[in-house]
Amino acid sequence: MNLSRRAMLGATGLATLPGMPAPWATSPAAAQTERVLRYGISMADIPQTTGQPDRGAGAYQFTGHTLYDPLVAWEMDVADRPGKLIPGLATAWEADPSDRRKWVFRLRPGVKFHDGSDFDAEAVIWEFRKGP
């Protein structure tokens, strides 16, 4: 069976009826006043939920922000410049003055895992050693 691109778009709901604007089309005036960020990823990028997301930044946004708190997060509420790094589970971080290849993280106190166990340096080390 040989389907045309138009037939495939129609099957996926991406095609529009004649005279109707495409759902993703935005006028220049509306684009300048729009304050909503729309982001899409392909279905192949839905990460597994058995560990940390491992399929790129798009997949991390899909489940990572809802399942995991990072040591260091990205500022996500700005549109006019790149986001900066902001505290997450680490309240501060700096390069070790005696070895600039190592980093020292100050962890947020009082954080617990869903099972009630403490979030501490041992938990962070375990996660880094476990890998994706």
Image (tube, grey):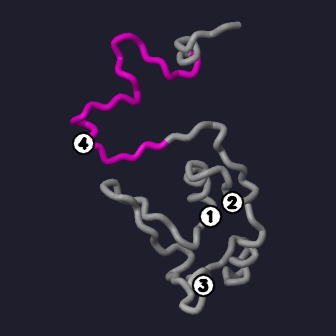
- What residue is shown at x 71% (from left), y 7% (from top)? 1
Q: Which residue is mark 3?
A: 110
Which tag, 1 or 4, sits closer to the chain's start?
Answer: 4
Q: Is residue 28 left or right of residue 115?
A: left
User: Element under label 1?
Assistant: loop
- Image quadrant in which you'd find residue 71: bottom right
Cα–Cα span, label 4 and label 2 = 36 Å
Answer with the quarter of the image where residue 2 lies: top right
- Marks 2/1 in contact by CB < 8 Å: the verdict is yes
Task: Locate residue 118 relative to residue 89 in the image: left or right.
Answer: right
Q: Nearer the viewer, mark 2 or mark 1?
A: 2
Q: Say if 115 sits above or below 64 in the image.
A: below
Q: Nearer the viewer, mark 2 or mark 3?
A: 2
Numbered range of the magenta stretch: 11-39
Characterize the magenta stretch by its predominant secondary structure: loop
* Residue at the image position 59 percent from the left and 54 percent from the top: 60
Q: Which residue is mark 1?
A: 68
Question: Neighbour class for label 2 at 10 Å: few (<14), some, many (≥20)?
Answer: some
Indicate the position of residue 61 as horizontal and vertical percent values: 55, 53
The verdict on residue 36 being magenta is yes
Q: Is residue 44 above or below residue 23?
A: below
Separation of disc 2 and disc 1 at Cα?
7 Å
Left or right of residue 124, residue 60 in this image: left
**Image position of 72 with respect to 48: above or below:** below
For label 2, the SS is loop
Q: Specify the amino acid type for callout 1.
A: Tyr
Q: Earlier in the sequence, mark 3 or mark 1?
A: 1
Does any portion of residue 14 appear in the rendered image? yes
Image mark for residue 32: 4
Question: Label 2, on which residue?
Answer: 52
